[in-house]
Each structure stands twice: as structure tokens, then as C-alpha cells.
Image (tube, rainbow, N blue to C red):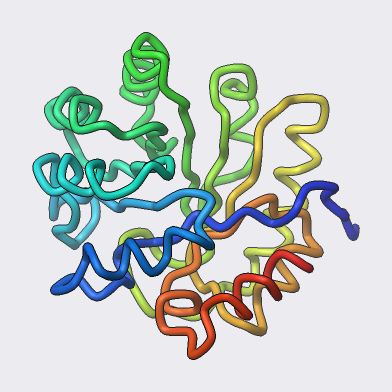
């Protein structure tokens, strides 16, 4: 099924792929083409990486007015969540695989007037998102393994986007594709119905940043 979203494709740019030694410079460079900045926060347990932390996010908040989208991958998310909210994130996405903890996080974030999201790993049935349709603003569908950088798009990813769009029909929830975002995969994800993507090296390493962003928005 080919779904043609009406709104331009949104770019939730992953700062994981920015030059981390020159983060302020790259934020300034990327800001004109970003709809938001995607921040992966891992605890080294739930996902095998240590990335953005509250003090760093607070500094990033001072550098840009773009929305900050936190993807919180931690075994004890409530231990970290208040500090990230205080740092100034605008949206918090939590893995649906956390079970009961998901509701606690969503309730806390919504209580602070922020946007909410859930993410689904590749092996998680998209139908699991059904109870959350009225509680979130976005669903992030992983197209690669959680917390792993530089992997190719899984062959199931596009069908999962289409299935999720059908599940969310009638609800104001966007679908974001995260992982395996390449020049050859974005058109496929867009045709499947993705409202937004989380581009990393595709944008951060582009020879012509403005032209790449303009091309993505034509899809």
C-alpha cells in the first residue's frame, strides 16, 4: 500500500552523527534545515551505548530554539527523566518494550506539558502501539537494532511503517522512521507513509547540506 503524506517530510536530525568535538558549530550549521534535533540517551544497559546526558542537553538547549526530541533508552527511565525535562527537552520518546514503565513516563512528561512518543524495536508487533494512540504525539519505528549506529535498513522496516500508519488512522500521531536512513532508503520509507525521519550521516555528512535537505522535503 502506497501512502502519500500531505505534509512535507520532517527532519528530526540526529546529533549523534554531528561532530561531537565541534557540537556547537554543527548545531549552528544544521539548524536552518532541522525541524527538530534528535537526542539518543542510553544508559549502557538497555542499549549498549552512552550518549547524551542532562548537563549536555541543557547546554544544547542554549544553542538552539529548535525542538529537542529525547529518545530515552534506559532500564530505569524515571531516574533520568526529571533531569532531562529540566534541561529543556520538548518531546520524550520511550521504548514500548518497557511495559508498565511506559505509562509512568508518558504521564509524567504530559504532566509537564511536553510532547510524548513511543518507539518500537524491529521484533515488536506494531499492534502493541494500539493502547497508546491517544496518549502520544509520535511513534518511532526502529529500522535497525536499538542503540546501534551505521546499520543498513532492515527489510521489514517499510511494511512496518505502512502497518503503523493504518493502525493510527484517525489519530493525530506522526510516524518517524529511525535507523538505516540512507539516500536509497528514504524514498522507500516515505512511500510507505513515514511522516518524519531521523537522518544522521545523510544530513550531517552531506556535501551540500541545503540541497540534500531540499531533496528530502520533495519526497
Q: Quadrant of the C terminus?
A: bottom right
Identify the residue shown where x is 48% and y is 84%.
Answer: 206
Q: Residue 6 appears at what percent x and percent y?
A: 85, 47
Viewer-side residue, 86 vs 169 = 86
Rendered position, 9 above or below 109: below
Q: In which quarter of the image is residue 93?
A: top left
- Horizontal side, residue 198 vs residue 8: left or right: left
Q: Residue 150 appears at what percent x and percent y?
A: 38, 79
Q: Residue furthest top?
A: 111
Rendered position, 67 above or below 197: above
- Horizontal side, residue 86 vs residue 66: left or right: left
Identify the residue shown where x is 45% and y is 60%.
Answer: 13
Q: Quadrant of residue 108?
A: top left
Identify the residue shown where x is 26% and y is 31%.
Answer: 88
Q: Quadrant of the N terminus?
A: bottom right
Q: Residue 12 appears at what percent x and percent y?
A: 50, 54
Q: Residue 120 appears at what percent x and percent y?
A: 49, 46
Amino acid at each position: 500500500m502506497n501512502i502519500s503524506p500531505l505534509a512535507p517530510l520532517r527532519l528530526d536530525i540526529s546529533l549523534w552523527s554531528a561532530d561531537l568535538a565541534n557540537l556547537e558549530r554543527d548545531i549552528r550549521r544544521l539548524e536552518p534545515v532541522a525541524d527538530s534535533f534528535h537526542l539518543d540517551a542510553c544508559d549502557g544497559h538497555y542499549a549498549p551505548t552512552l550518549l547524551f546526558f542532562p548537563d549536555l542537553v541543557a547546554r544544547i538547549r542554549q544553542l538552539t530554539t529548535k525542538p529537542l526530541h529525547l529518545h530515552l533508552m534506559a532500564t530505569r527511565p524515571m531516574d533520568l527523566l526529571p533531569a532531562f525535562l529540566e534541561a529543556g527537552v520538548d518531546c520524550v520518546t520511550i521504548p514500548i518494550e518497557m511495559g508498565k514503565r511506559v505509562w509512568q513516563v508518558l504521564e509524567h512528561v504530559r504532566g509537564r506539558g511536553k510532547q510524548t512518543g513511543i518507539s518500537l524495536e524491529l521484533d515488536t508487533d506494531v499492534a502493541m502501539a494500539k493502547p497508546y494512540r491517544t496518549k502520544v504525539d509520535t511513534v518511532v519505528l526502529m529500522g535497525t537494532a536499538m542503540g546501534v549506529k551505521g546499520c543498513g535498513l532492515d527489510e521489514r522496516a517499510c511494511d512496518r511503517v505502512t502497518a503503523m500508519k493504518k493502525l493510527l488512522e484517525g489519530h493525530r500521531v506522526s510516524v518517524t522512521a529511525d535507523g538505516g536512513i540512507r539516500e536509497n532508503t528514504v524514498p522507500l520509507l516515505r512511500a510507505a507513509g513515514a511522516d518524519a525521519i531521523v537522518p544522521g550521516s545523510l544530513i550531517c555528512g552531506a556535501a551540500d547540506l541545503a540541497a540534500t535537505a531540499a531533496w528530502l522535503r520533495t519526497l
